[in-house]
Amino acid sequence: MTKSQPTKSESSLARILVIADDEGGRATLRGAVDAAGVEATLDELPDGADMVAGLADGRYDCALLASTDAAVARIRAAGLTTPVVYVDDDGLAPRLRHALRLGHAERELATVRAQLDAAHQAAARAAHAHTTLLSIVSHDLRGPLSAINVALDGLGDDEVVGADRQRYVASVQRSVEKANRLIKDLVTAEQIDAGTLRVERHPVLVKALVEQAARDSEQAARQANMPIVTDIDPTASKIFADRDQLLQAISNLLTNALRHARGSGPIELSARLGDRVVELIIRDHGPGIVEELRPHIFDRHWPGRERRGGAGLGLAIAQGIARSHGGQVSYSATEGGGATFTLQVPTAG
């Protein structure tokens, strides 16, 4: 395809595709445009199969060609609606201007339609995600709220004393923690999606961070009969990060391991120094993730290796927090079974 040189800003000019078999024919068509007093960007093609492909992307206001019904038939057979002007028609100038106005209006309409379609699809996706989220949240909150109700009924019984009373109190505490984690995850997920998650960076001691993360999940690990074993490389001493956010990310990764690797041995939480990053590694010895599901593990509302409840936000949030710090979370299969998630965070600098 050859292209003429316009005399003013290309964005302010009409676009015409000139179609003729030879250079002489194309020169004639160019002269016809000049004689009609129309300023336009002219692209040129031979009268052949490429003609349809040239018009297919909808960027031209009209096509200008010699009077050949066969060429027009090919254009219309391809489903193209680009206005066509014959050069040997009488009154070329008004016909050409009319075709350009019509073609320009059709191009603008196509753009608007594409934008509306994209907006409609985005709104449909958002509505579906919202409905899904409400369904998941209502389901997941029902569990801790029901447990709290049961415990409160028990505590209201004057005959419940001593160790039984303490068990009810502990049940309320666990349920409140579970509800708070869910709400915190929902808020963080929305901030990540909206790009409003604020990262307040401070020097963070890696050893203290890992030990705190293990303590925060100690009760859940005890219930799952899966101790959390820590291993901290002394050279991985410090990172420059938002401590609370990293604790949330590690907690989500530990919760994921405890949920899906239940009863399969200890969870290993370790830290080591990499190339200008500290790697926080959570390894379990459960069933792992089948290969075809691995591309989706960081998607929102992904239920994991088995559907065992949960809002499906934990891994997505961990990834969002890692990326907000300039790092990432990666997955790898553990030799002999299980899963390994590695959260990389840049070192303090």
Image: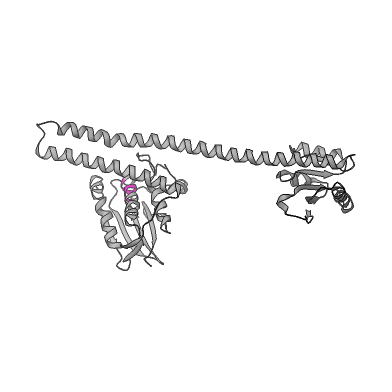
Is residue 189 visible in the rendered structure shown here? yes
Asked if the stretch drawn in magenta spans residue 284, the answer is no
Is residue 71 visible in the rendered structure shown here? no
- Describe residue 174's horizontal placement relative to residue 271 as left or right: left
| Residue 140, placed above or below residue 337 | above
Main SS of the magenta segment?
helix
Q: Quadrant of the C terminus?
A: bottom left
| Residue 122 percent across, percent down from the top left | 53, 40
| Residue 323 percent across, percent down from the top left | 43, 55
| Residue 323, placed above or below residue 125 | below
Q: Nearer the viewer, residue 184 or 269?
A: 184
Q: Nearer the viewer, residue 180 or 15?
A: 15
Q: Quadrant of the rendered structure where residue 113 is?
A: top right
| Residue 10, placed above or below residue 75 | below
The magenta segment:
254-258
Identify the residue shown where x is 31% and y is 59%.
270
Which colour scheme appears in the figure? one colour
| Residue 107 percent across, percent down from the top left | 70, 41
| Residue 307 percent across, percent down from the top left | 37, 39
Number of callouts in the render?
0
Q: Quadrant of the rendered structure where residue 110 is?
A: top right
Q: Nearer the viewer, residue 47 or 67?
A: 67
Identify the residue shown where x is 45% and y is 50%.
195
